[in-house]
Image (tube, rainbow, N blue to C red):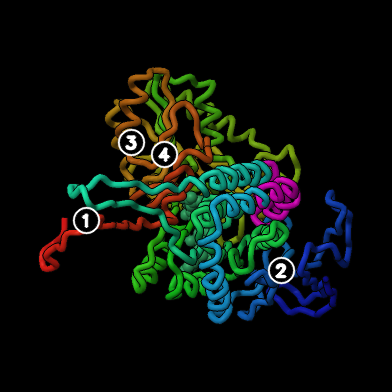
């Protein structure tokens, strides 16, 4: 079922006609300058805006009531999708749907939960081109990377599906022979899952499948900049056949997120985003003692020792910061280089940075797209200005690339001679800006690497196995890569500490975050015990 209507709109841009589309199933209708997409459906170009003013609640598509907002394609800089903010009432309806679905879902066998999760993974893979294209239109990341991330997301769904029927408890041998004791891992209840704009479906894959596999139900809120792919996932959730209310999707910005995370009927929050937002959520969560996992930012150090294989370390350092235009939480944004190789590395990294191919993120040849939104570009520009003010040496970049002024592009930027007291060495930029620092000894490298408020990821390049392990032991970060960078696996736990957050995603640790332990004791004896003293 679908309807199509025309409406005059006075948005932040000039008034324009746009095609309004609302469909319970897959969207297949369009209007205006339509071109045939690879999926064979109609694609809207020009000023047409696709209607995504819907939330998935209890397996029904319902219109949000909190007012409309547009999603801007950062490459074309025009609005291409419209959403609605979830009002407090919308949030409460979604939470109520998840709550009513919880008792039956909790009692569904792990095997049956896994079948649905696996089906969803299959559907994501079937629609991978469409999902990747939607994400690229929303966040401007190259479509190759988005496709790769969605393939990884499907892999994570399968990993957690495999754990759904393996959440074993333990039996405990107590001091008292007559008492039998066992534990069970129980689901927590309704989970609020909130994602950032850089990788919506991949970030969600770290949250949704472990929550479901453990027997929880969910309300998902993607970033206001990138809501479309999560709504498209909603279509696949319906197709997969999840029972009503098990997975709900709402859209909106801070207001919707705050209403969700302060809702008294939320049993678990899993958040990916910035530390300032996390502090607000933690304050809200405190009111109801809601447990939470926070996946936040980083200022990760990538260390090149004098014995490193530079043929591998330099591409690793370049991709570590410029992949996804630096908009990854694990970006190796600080490159620490031993004094003996410093000049050589700075020169090589700058040369490679200048060769990064910027352009249309839909073009398979492009290596770096624009930044995700104009507010973010301003933030990156401010960080560059602060670095210059603090005395860092600009080696390359620092502005929009030639011919790309008045766009959201930022040239790959390298600053050398950065010192730990500079803002560029301490504050997350979340953009294509590399800070190169020099060190002379292993202990100095460790001290610099550990010298920020973040502790998410770290990397080191060395051909000395002893040095590599010795240094890795001292690096304060949730992940340490040796002779690689930005490698991820469904089985490997991921997360940080300090201002990078707490809790772990992926791996077996990732599913335990969505469970609580219940202990059960059974007295097998017939003896009457003294009830006024502690039984043991
Ligand atoms: P953000 O904190 O601005 O927004 C993240 C999400 O929180 C969005 O969905 C947003 O709508 C929501 N939100 C905003 N205000 C809220 C509030 N008061 N209450 C509840 N929810 C609220 O972050 P962003 O700009 O979308 O993402 C960039 C940040 O995310 C960077 O710091 C980056 O390092 C971090 N990040 C971390 C990881 C990780 O896994 N560690 C991954 C990706 C991004």
Q: In the image, which disc is placed on residue 243?
A: none
Is the residue under label 2 in contact with that under label 3 (CB below 8 Å)? no
Q: Is residue 255 visible?
A: yes
Numbered disc 1: secondary structure: loop
Mark 3 or 2, closer to the camera: 2
Label 1: few (<14), some (14–19) or many (≥20) C-alpha neighbours in 10 Å:
few
Residue wearing tag 2: 52
User: How far from the left and from the top, in percent, is residue 10?
Assistant: 73, 79
Which is nearer the N-term, disc 3 or disc 1? Answer: 3
Residue wearing tag 1: 525
Which is nearer the N-term, disc 4 or disc 2? Answer: 2
Label 2: few (<14), some (14–19) or many (≥20) C-alpha neighbours in 10 Å:
many
Q: In the image, is residue 231 part of the stretch drawn in magenta? A: no
Q: Is residue 173 left or right of residue 103?
A: left
Which is nearer the N-term, disc 3 or disc 2? Answer: 2
User: How far from the left and from the top, in percent, is residue 385?
Assistant: 47, 52
> Whole-Å distance between the Cαs marked 1 and 4?
49 Å
> Whole-Å distance between the Cαs marked 3 and 1?
52 Å
Above or below for 345 versus 55: above
Mark 3 or 1, closer to the camera: 1
Front-lying residue, 91 or 453: 91
> Whole-Å distance between the Cαs marked 4 and 2?
37 Å
Q: In the image, which disc is placed on residue 475?
A: 3
The segment highlighted magenta reads 120-144
Above or below for 462 versus 290: above
| Label 2 C-beta lies within 8 Å of the nearest ligand 1 atom | no
> Whole-Å distance between the Cαs marked 3 and 2?
44 Å
> Whole-Å distance between the Cαs marked 1 and 2?
63 Å
């Amino acid at each position: 079922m679908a309807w199509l209507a025309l409406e005059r709109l006075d948005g932040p841009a000039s008034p324009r006609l746009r095609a309004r589309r609302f469909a319970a199933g897959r969207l297949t209708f369009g209007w205006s300058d339509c071109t045939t997409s690879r999926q064979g459906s109609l694609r809207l170009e020009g000023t047409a805006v696709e209607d995504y003013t819907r939330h998935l609640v209890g397996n029904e598509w319902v219109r949000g009531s909190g007012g409309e907002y547009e999603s801007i394609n950062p490459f074309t800089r025009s609005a291409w999708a419209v959403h609605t903010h979830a009002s407090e009432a919308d949030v409460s309806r979604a939470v109520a749907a998840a709550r009513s679905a919880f008792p039956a879902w909790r009692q569904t066998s792990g095997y049956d939960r896994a079948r649905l999760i696996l089906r969803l993974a299959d559907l994501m893979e079937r629609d991978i081109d469409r999902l990747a294209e939607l994400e690229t239109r929303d966040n401007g990341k190259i479509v190759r990377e988005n496709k790769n991330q969605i393939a990884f997301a499907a892999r994570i769904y399968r990993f957690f599906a495999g754990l759904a029927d393996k959440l074993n408890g333990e039996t405990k041998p107590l001091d008292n022979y007559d008492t039998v004791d066992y534990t069970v891992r129980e689901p927590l209840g309704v989970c609020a899952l909130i994602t950032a704009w850089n990788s919506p479906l991949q970030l969600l894959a770290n949250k949704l499948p472990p929550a479901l596999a453990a027997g929880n139900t969910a309300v998902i809120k993607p970033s206001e900049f990138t809501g479309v792919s999560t709504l498209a996932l909603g279509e696949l959730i319906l197709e997969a056949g999840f029972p009503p209310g098990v997975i709900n999707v709402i859209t909106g910005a801070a207001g919707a997120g705050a209403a969700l995370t302060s809702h008294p009927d939320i049993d678990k929050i899993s958040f990916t985003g910035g530390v300032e937002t996390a502090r607000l959520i933690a304050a809200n969560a405190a009111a109801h003692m809601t447990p939470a996992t926070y996946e936040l930012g980083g200022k990760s150090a990538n260390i090149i020792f004098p014995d490193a294989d530079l043929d591998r370390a330099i591409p690793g350092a370049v991709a570590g910061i410029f992949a996804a235009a630096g908009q990854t939480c694990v970006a190796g944004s600080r490159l620490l280089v031993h004094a003996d190789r410093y000049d050589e590395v700075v020169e090589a990294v700058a040369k490679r940075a200048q060769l990064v191919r910027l352009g249309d993120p839909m073009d398979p040849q492009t290596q770096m797209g624009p930044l995700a939104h104009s507010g973010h570009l301003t933030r990156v520009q401010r960080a560059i200005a602060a670095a210059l003010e603090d005395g860092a040496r600009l080696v390359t970049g620092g502005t929009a690339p030639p011919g790309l002024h008045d766009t959201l592009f930022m040239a790959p930027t390298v600053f050398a001679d950065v010192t730990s007291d500079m803002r560029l060495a301490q504050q997350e930029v979340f953009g294509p800006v590399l800070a190169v620092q020099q060190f002379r000894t292993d202990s100095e490298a460790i001290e610099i690497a550990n010298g920020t408020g973040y502790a998410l990821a770290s990397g080191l390049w060395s051909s000395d196995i002893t040095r590599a392990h010795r240094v890795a032991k001292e690096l304060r970060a949730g992940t340490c890569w040796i002779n690689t960078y930005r490698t991820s696996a469904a089985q490997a736990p991921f997360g940080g500490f300090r201002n990078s957050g707490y809790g772990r995603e992926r791996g077996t640790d990732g599913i335990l975050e969505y469970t609580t332990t219940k202990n059960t004791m059974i007295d097998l004896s017939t003896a009457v015990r003294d009830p006024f003293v502690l039984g043991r």
